[in-house]
């Protein structure tokens, strides 16, 4: 089964909790704090495995969750970091953050790997909070929650040349003639249900990879038929080889066929529409092919056209030699602009409050990443930890903002799923 698109929820590991502990020795009755820090949670890392050809191994993994770091202990024992979670994917896998629409990683080299979600840091033990003013703190932190992302993994096959065209124009037949690939071939539409790859070797020992992409139809770029599932694979190719049934044996007009596919390529992506293109006039052994070819050349006099018969292996060597020469000249182009990549985004920080406050059904709802992170890392069963939490909120200006909005002492304030009383 060929699986080339998967949606996953990724949850990195939470950091281990810090420890609240004091030295307890026979002759040291007033020992100082010795609580160790927690370990870091698992990162979720995607790496390339050249042995994989599809994303089928991820098909039933709806959620991937990292492990929590080990908690710190007394006697200054730090918790161990959790082992990272390694996910293996095929070469050519693109990973997109569905919340932002940005590409997190495009794994196109054998050694590529990417940290998709970072594990949370370990919580600090009470020794780390010791200061001159408070040499014996009676609190520690919980571990930081790991990152959570909803991602889409797409396999965009790596090929130098992509064969495109309407169904049953001879793409699979051509690929079978020029490589060791054994695609399924039959005289009905959509015989090919997944892309086929073939390695072509020329007499000068030059090699290149050719992909037979399943038949497109009108509206493919908008999801009609099977085409939108496979146009993505053409994005990585250097050359588009457009196969046309020049005989029109199924009652179709070769000119109309060509224009339908050109429209779909441009609708899917401007970059795809602008790729180097070669026209392959197939089925030239059939009646009517020569006259149709003449009409085609009249309308498109500047196009590079190779008349062939894939069935009878005629004209193919000239085509392959031309492709080999063009590939030697062609430079690899990136398929993503910088503004589509998460790693290339530059964020401008404004002097805005790192939180929002709104009143919902008489409850003041407080939201903000920094506040929620502080809340999740606070041990509310330790009095000093609660006082520190309140002090941090006051330092962020939350108390003043609540009063400015009209909050009264005794009102309820909600952070995440927890409700507190607003008081001195």
Image (tube, helix red, strand yellow):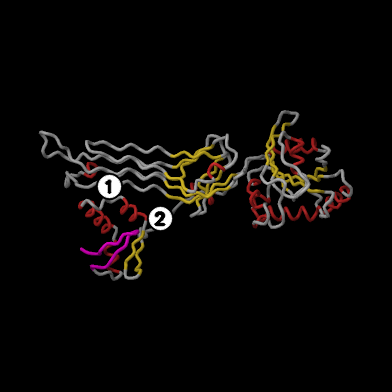
Compared to residue 323, the image places residue 260 above or below, namely: below
Q: Position of residue 159 (x, y in %)?
A: 65, 40
Q: Quadrant of residue 49?
A: top right
Residue 247 located within the stretch drawn in magenta: no
Q: Residues within 10 Å of mark 1 (few under 14, many from 20)?
A: many
Q: Callout 2: helix, strand or loop?
A: loop
Which numbered tag is attached to residue 126?
A: none
Q: Position of residue 6 (x, y in %)?
A: 55, 48
Looking at the figure, which quarter contains the N terminus?
A: top right
Instruction: Please name the residue shown 51% across and 53% down the image.
Output: 98
Q: Which residue position holds label 2?
A: 349
Q: Tell me the mark number nearer the camera, choosing from 1 and 2.
A: 1
Separation of marks 1 and 2 at Cα, in angstroms:
28 Å
Q: Nearer the viewer, residue 232 or 181?
A: 181
Residue 419 located within the stretch drawn in magenta: yes
Q: Callout 1: helix, strand or loop?
A: loop
Looking at the figure, which quarter contains the C terminus?
A: bottom left
Q: Which residues are magenta?
A: 409-424
Q: Which residue position holds label 1?
A: 141
Q: Quadrant of residue 30?
A: top left
Q: Nearer the viewer, residue 224 or 162?
A: 224
Of the image marks 1 and 2, the number of the one nearer the N terminus: 1
Q: Position of residue 289 (x, y in %)?
A: 86, 48
> Is 210 on the left-hand or right-hand side of 63?
right
Compared to residue 351, the image places residue 80 above or below, namely: above
> Is 275 on the left-hand or right-hand side of 32?
right
> Is 71 on the left-hand or right-hand side of 162?
left
């Amino acid at each position: 089964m060929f699986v080339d698109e998967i949606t996953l929820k990724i949850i990195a590991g939470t950091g281990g909790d810090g420890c609240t502990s004091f030295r307890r020795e026979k002759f040291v009755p007033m020992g100082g704090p010795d609580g160790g820090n927690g370990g870091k949670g698992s990162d979720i890392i995607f790496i390339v495995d050249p042995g994989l050809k599809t994303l089928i191994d991820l098909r039933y993994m709806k959620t991937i969750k990292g492990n929590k770091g080990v908690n710190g202990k007394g006697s200054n024992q730090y918790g161990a970091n959790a082992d990272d979670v390694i996910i293996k994917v095929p070469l050519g896998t693109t990973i997109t953050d569905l919340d932002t629409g940005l590409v997190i990683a495009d794994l196109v080299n054998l050694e590529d790997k990417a940290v998709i979600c970072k594990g949370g840091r370990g919580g600090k033990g009470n020794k780390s909070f010791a200061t001159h003013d408070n040499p014996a703190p009676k609190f520690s932190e919980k571990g930081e929650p790991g990152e959570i992302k909803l991602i889409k993994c797409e396999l965009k096959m790596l090929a130098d040349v992509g064969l495109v065209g309407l169904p049953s124009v001879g793409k699979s037949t051509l690929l079978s003639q020029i490589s060791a690939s054994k695609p399924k071939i039959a005289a009905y539409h959509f015989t090919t249900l997944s892309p086929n790859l073939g390695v072509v070797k020329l007499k000068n020992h030059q090699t290149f990879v050719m992909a037979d992409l399943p038949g497109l139809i009108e509206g493919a770029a908008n999801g009609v038929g099977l085409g939108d599932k496979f146009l993505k694979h053409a994005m990585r190719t250097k050359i588009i080889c457009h196969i046309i049934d020049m005989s029109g044996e199924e009652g179709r007009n070769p000119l109309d066929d060509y224009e339908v596919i050109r429209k779909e390529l441009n609708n899917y992506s401007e970059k795809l529409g602008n790729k180097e293109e070669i026209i392959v006039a197939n089925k030239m052994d059939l009646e009517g092919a020569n006259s149709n070819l003449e009409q085609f050349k009249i309308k498109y006099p500047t196009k590079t056209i190779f008349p062939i018969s894939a069935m009878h292996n005629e004209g193919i060597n000239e085509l392959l030699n031309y492709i080999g020469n063009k590939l030697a000249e062609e430079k690899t182009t990136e398929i993503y602009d910088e503004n589509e990549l998460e790693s290339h985004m530059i964020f401008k920080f404004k002097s805005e409050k790192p939180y929002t406050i709104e009143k919902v059904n008489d409850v003041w709802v407080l939201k903000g990443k920094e506040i929620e992170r502080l809340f999740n890392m606070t041990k509310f069963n330790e009095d000093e930890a609660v006082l520190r939490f309140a002090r941090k909120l006051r330092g962020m200006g939350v108390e003043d903002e609540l009063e400015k909005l009209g909050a009264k002492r005794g009102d309820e304030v909600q952070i995440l799923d927890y409700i507190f009383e607003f008081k001195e």
